[in-house]
Each structure stands twice: as C-alpha cells, then as structure tokens.
Image (spheres, grey):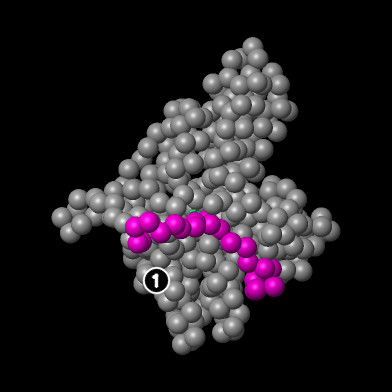
Amino acid sequence: MRVHGTPYRTLWMEGGVVRMIDQTRLPFEFVVVDCQTHHETAAAVREMVVRGAPALGAAGAFAMAQGFAEAPSVAPWPYARDARALIAATRPTARDLFAGIEHVWSAAEASPHAPADAALAAALAFAEASVESCRMLGEHGAALIPSGARVLTHCNAGWLATVDHGSALAPVFAAAGQGRPPFVWVDETRPRGQGARLTAWELSNEELPHAVIADNAAAHYMSRGEVDLVIVGADRIAANGDVVNKVGTLAKAVCAREFGIPFYVAAPPSTFDAATANGASVEIEERGWEEVHYQTGPDEAGAMHRIRVTSPGSPARNPAFDATPARLVTGYVTDRGVLTLDQLRAAAAGTDSARAAAGATGA
Ligand code: MRU
C-alpha cells in the first residue's frame, strides 16, 4: 500500500525485527512499531496492533522465526516449543495464525542442524506466498465487479488485514486498477470499528468512492437495490465451506440471500481449514466487555479521548466472530479462481486439483 506516496506492507521482517503498522492508532496516527522478540510480536497480535487473518499468518510465522533465532543453539527445542505455545495462545479463531506457525515449525524440524536459518527462510517465504495469493485472488475477483458496481464489505479485509493487497478489498483495488472503480459501502463494524477506521482509511488513501454506514443500515440499502454484491474476507473457512468471519457477517449473508444479492468470500490458502468440519466447531474469540462500553477518538482539536457509550453498570457480551453457513455463500474468491461450494468441498476431500487453493497450506 502507498501511504503519503511511500509503499508499505502491513508487516515485514528486517534484521530479525518484526516491523508493523500500528492498526490501533489508525486512522488518526500513522506509526510503525518494532517488535524485537517473539514476546513482543505475540503481544502485538494479542493487542491487535496487527490484526486480520492473513496478516496474523505472517505475524505468527515471523514470531516463530524470532523464537528460533532467540533459542540457545545447543538445545533450541524447549525454548522454541515454549515460544510456539505463547504465539498460538494469542488469538484463537484465525486459521492463518496457526498455518504460519506450523509452516515455520515444520521447516525448522526438517533442518535440525540449522533450524533458525530454516525458520527465517520459511517465514519470509510464507509471507511472500501470502502476498502473491492475495494479488491473484484480487485479479480473479475483479471479474465479479462490473462497471459502476456498488460493493458492500464488512470489517477490514483490505491491505491492513493481509501482508499486502487485501482479501475482500483486493478485487476492489484490482477492478479500480482496471479502470472500473466501484462504490464501496463500508460497514462500521462495531465494536472495534475496523470498517469505519481501517477500510475507510484505505479507500480514502486510494481515492475510491465509498460511504461508511452504521452496521444496522446495510439491510436498508440492500432492500432498496443499492447493493450489487457483497464481498467479505474470512478468518477460517471450514471443510464444508462454512465461513467464520467478523461478527455481523452472518447478518449480511442472510440479508443478501433475502434480496437476491451475490455474497462472496475472499481468502488466501492459509485461511482454509480442511481439518475442521464446519463453522460450529470453530472457537469464537470472546473479547473484553470494555470494547463494547468504550470508544476512543479525537475531539475537534485533535486530543484523543476514551468515552463510555453504554449505560454505566450494564453488562455486555463481545463475540468477535460468527459463522456463516456455506449455503449462503455464492462463491469463494481464491488465488485459483472463484470456486463454487462443490469445487471447494471436492478440494477439502482431496479429490480435486483445486486442493492447493483450499486447504493444502491451511490443513
Ligand atoms: O478481529 P480482526 O480484526 O482480526 O478480524 C478480522 C476479520 O474478521 C475481517 O473481517 C477479515 O475478513 C478477516 S481478515 C481478511
């Protein structure tokens, strides 16, 4: 992505340090933070300095490489095992985090005389492959977006949710690059506001037409014929095609079906989980109540404030994700093309050449 004319990835590794754009401070401040150790990278994942499933894949891979680099060279495995457990315990839902960790771990195991070198090479390769998958799925998904289309998206599945290019927004950026800039409806995405803060910031950066809407406004625009297609990302796609994504995705899928609007899910291979049968089997992260009770932002003079937005004393609940049944998904936008549910199920069963697109990395 370009920020003030300079190209950036969401996160990258430089001399053993993991560097990332601090997503907790966007859109009000653009800051790059450095994580020197696997402990610091894991903390950044836990605190959502970096977030979004494909970006978490790279973060997990980089953190695991840091763990191997820090481990005593005579007996690296106990230290590396502890590092793996710590990184894996940061966030439970996105499959990509575990795909990144496992990819690096396997490479180190296969190279017992130089596990740290193998881990670093594997982590860098994992991130590069993720970038290329997102670029490719953007190219395939762009064909779904006709001239003048109005696309609705939920949460942030743009550049910032990936190492680069985005997942749900990759087709939007690719279509714009082909001279067909769509209009994007941006769901605010309470409680953390990834749509209002991050997706809107990315689209503004690219000067693409868009409007932020309250989460509960999407059905209204769908019912009036003002949404042509929905594209969302995913945190985990189960073997039966069920899609676990940011909470609120399910409601959009139900509405899209009601009003006859195509509903697409875009994801790189690391998000597909052939080992999990269905969406109901996926652990849904339950986050702190304070995210529902409080909002943070600048006043007109630019001073940041944290304010309460719910009735004092009321309890809250805060599931971070929900599961959308496969029957509501029109197609899966992958780096191998746009797959139907049948193609996806064949891939999960290992009976189809699309297997690599739908589970080989994520399995
Ligand atoms: O909690 P987050 O911000 O890490 O969740 C991210 C999402 O759920 C996004 O909607 C996205 O589709 C998955 S990442 C491309």
Residue 72 located within the stretch drawn in magenta = no
Q: Which residues are magenta?
A: 310-331
- Specify the amino acid type for callout 1: Ala
Q: Residue furthest left?
A: 301
Q: Residue furthest right?
A: 351
As displayed, is residue 56 above or below residue 331?
above
| Residue in the image at 57% along x and 35% along y | 87
| Residue in the image at 48% along x and 66% along y | 154
Q: Is residue 122 left or right of residue 44?
A: right
| Residue in the image at 39% along x and 72% along y | 213
As displayed, is residue 229 above or below residue 203?
below
Q: Quadrant of residue 177?
A: bottom left
The residue that mark 1 highlights is: 214
Q: Residue 173, how many percent across, how many down?
A: 46, 64
Q: Is mark 1 within 8 Å of ligand 1?
A: no
Q: Can residue 201 be seen from the camera position used here?
A: no
